[in-house]
Amino acid sequence: MIGLASLLNLLLPYWPVAVIVALTVLLAWLVGWLVGRLIRGGSPQMAVAARRLAVVMVGLIGGTLALQALGVSPDILLLVVALLGVTALVALRDPLGNYGAKYFSDIYTPFKVGDTIEVKGYSGKVIEINPMTTVLLSDKEQLVSVPNASMIHDVVVNTSPQAWKEVIIPVSISGNIDLPAFESDLLKTLSKLRARLDPRFPPVVTTKARSPQSTDLTLTLMLRRPEDRDAITAETNKRLTEVLDRVRAGRR
Amino acid sequence: MFGPKNHDCRTRRIPSQGNSARRVQRAVLGADFTQKILCPIAPIGSVRGGGASLPPLSICINTQTPLVQFLPPTDDVRGNEAAGAPSTLDGLREGIDYRYSPGGVTRMVYPLVRRLLHERVLDQAHWVALNPTGPRLIRIGELTLHNLSIENARMAGYGKVKEAIWGRIHELDAVEEHDDLFWSDAFSEYAYYNRFTAELIRSLDKELDFDAFYIHDFQQLAVGHMLSTLKPKIFRWHIPFDASTIPEKWRSMLSTYLNSYDVVVVSARRYAKSLLALRPKGKIVRLYPYVDPADYSLPENGPILAASQRIGLQPADEVALVVGRMDPIKGQDLVIDAMATLALSYPLLKLVLVGNGSFSGSQGGLGLSKSAVWRAHLEEMVKERGLEGRVVFTGHLGQEELDCMYQRCRFSILPSVREGFGLVAVESWLHGRPVIVTERAGIAELVRDGGNGLLFAPDAPGALVHQMQRLLDDRSGKLSARLAKNGRVTAKKCSLDAAERAEAELLTDVTEAS
């Protein structure tokens, strides 16, 4: 009994810290969910990134407040974090640049594995996009490794035929979703957009990866007019979410 | 019909080519279409199994039509399933409880699989097919049949799309009729059926780790794409292929699906040539369809007489035989028209039309009514032309009665307006009967007019009548004998022996390449 009383006495001054940590976790989850809902019509990668950023920000603020409650000066903490950050950025400038470029090029650069592109005077078929480089196979069957940062800084020309038409939307669905029903419903709903899509290229769903937990798919659409890209992407993402909700609810 | 069977003691078997078929012609079409490879046939054991170093393969076959249809679904089979044990055909009666599906695809695939399993090229084979009235699982020796079914509402959409593809490829329907097919609601059900099939195959693969997938016929075309596996996939395109008949709006979709296969097999050289227009990524291989001569017999006079009497043939009748399902594509109407022209000049001539609906048209299958409508149309034609008593509709015949009809006829006719290949011509050759073949059939590339058969253009007025007259006027029998003799030789190219070597090599090539 004496031991327990001593422990309680020891922990009692720190209850505000526990409350702050608990609230931070709760708030981080809530903010993440809210951000996800707000930008559900946008690109799925952007949604994931925004959710993650929001959660990290809430965590950082919560952590700072918790440390302050413990009596640690937040100024010193922030200084240490800033110094570590700057050091890491200087030391890992190139790899981080490439990694970041890869991250953004996934979303914004209009090419994919299999396309033929020209960049920095090199041209070839894209056979790999890894976190650091994009690997091209040239006409002379040489492997050309282009740092991903170049894909952001330099002009990239996609010379694949009809590349401008192609919109590829990654879709990740839970492993317990009925895939045939999902695909069928998706094709049905997308056929309503056919006035905006090239009639020669109906939507194609391709399975990229499977695990018991999830199925990664891509949905390929071909535009009729290049200026419709953003509108079609947003509309498709909206419809994707609706189809998922319907299939989850077991309705057709 | 062509399952394991005991031959009646009153029949003689048609001699199998055995090891005499020493060469098989196979055209492999890649960048250089003119490159032709003649593959000498080695003993089968040197390809796979049979003590050779290469281990036997495990494959998954996929067709729309199931090997076995149940008439109707039996409690026996369902009982086995409920007990959790794999179902078999033991204790069930062929023709009463079940039947082997008619039609070229299952008729070809089953004997081949049986042979490849026997020769240890394969150590196990799983066959996934659409079979709404069958049990989930049936075991026939080392072959396991997996039957799947989808909801009726989805089946309707699927049926609509497959009929549209069929109609367009066979040029029965205008391009505009199906221009937007791949955007239709029905197509979403076609995609559903293919994805559903692919998911079942994927789950089997997870458990059984197949070496390769062999997908058959256009109804299943999307399955390869949906499987998303790096394992080798072969697709056999059984129907005709003429790129010029394919609507512009279909091409990208067909290309996407065809590109998912390592090899696309077609039945005729001209289909292979035309397929190049879609630039498929995989190899294009031409393999002739085939039959197992052991499944055919030469009946004695007694059974022939009995079968003839049953359908109302008189001993003096001169029989022209047409074997094919009731379908506009099969061109039975052309022969009825030819009969109308010849009826007066040849009073003993009778036309026997053998065949019913396909799996799609049968009650045990998809229940589409196409065949019944076509038969009614043909019967009306017969009436209008005053040919009652001169044209006999037999419906579906079992193999032994079919053998009797081939023996009873003077010649057979393959009158299709479009035909992927036309194995009935091979059947006629195996029975030593001359055959008149439409130029629109894949097998026409094996027919030399006046050499091993007679050819006619279905749209040329009088062409079929002329060829029928040549045979009817051949009183000395010289022409018929020559056509029959040479036809027997040609039939070897379409025998199971030839196919066994070619298919085993194909499987070996594709699995080793992967």
Image (tube, rainbow, N blue to C red):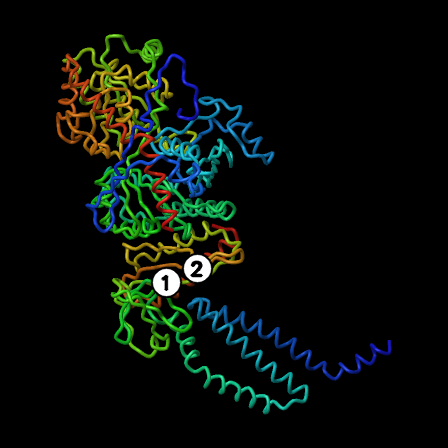
Q: Are marks 2 and 1 in contact (CB under 8 Å)?
A: no
Q: Position of residue A79 (x, y in %)?
A: 55, 90
Q: Position of residue A214 (x, y in %)?
A: 51, 58
What residue lies at 42% left-to-right and 75% top-to-bottom?
A: A99
Which residue does the numbered mark 1 point to in the structure image?
A: A168
Q: Position of residue B311 (x, y in %)?
A: 32, 13
Q: Is residue B19 visible?
A: yes
Q: Along the line of sight, which residue is nearer the eye, B347 or B42?
A: B42
**In screen coordinates, is B151 left or right of B443?**
right
Chain of the residue on which disc 2 is drawn: A
Q: Is residue B429 above or below residue B513?
A: above
What residue lies at 15% left-to-right and 15% top-to-bottom?
A: B474
Which element carries disc 1, helix, strand or loop?
strand
Which element carries disc 2, helix, strand or loop?
helix
Q: Is residue B232 above or below residue B298?
A: below
What residue lies at 23% left-to-right and 33% top-to-bottom?
A: B441
What residue lies at 36% left-to-right and 75% top-to-bottom?
A: A147
Amino acid type, label 1: Ile
> Mark 2 vs mark 1: same chain?
yes
How packed mark 1 is, by other alpha carbons closer than 10 Å (few <14, some 14-19, many 20 or more), is some
> Which of marks 1 and 2 precedes in the sequence?
1
Mark in front: 2 vs 1: 1
Q: Is residue B161 visible?
A: no
Q: Position of residue B479 (x, y in %)?
A: 15, 19
Q: Along the line of sight, which residue is nearer the eye, B36 or A125?
A: B36
Q: Residue furthest right?
A: A1
Corner quadrant of residue A55: bottom right
Which residue does the numbered mark 2 point to in the structure image?
A: A240
Q: CA distance from mark 2 to mark 1?
A: 13 Å
Amino acid type, label 2: Leu
Q: Is residue B188 above or below residue B300?
A: below
How packed mark 2 is, by other alpha carbons closer than 10 Å (few <14, some 14-19, many 20 or more), is many
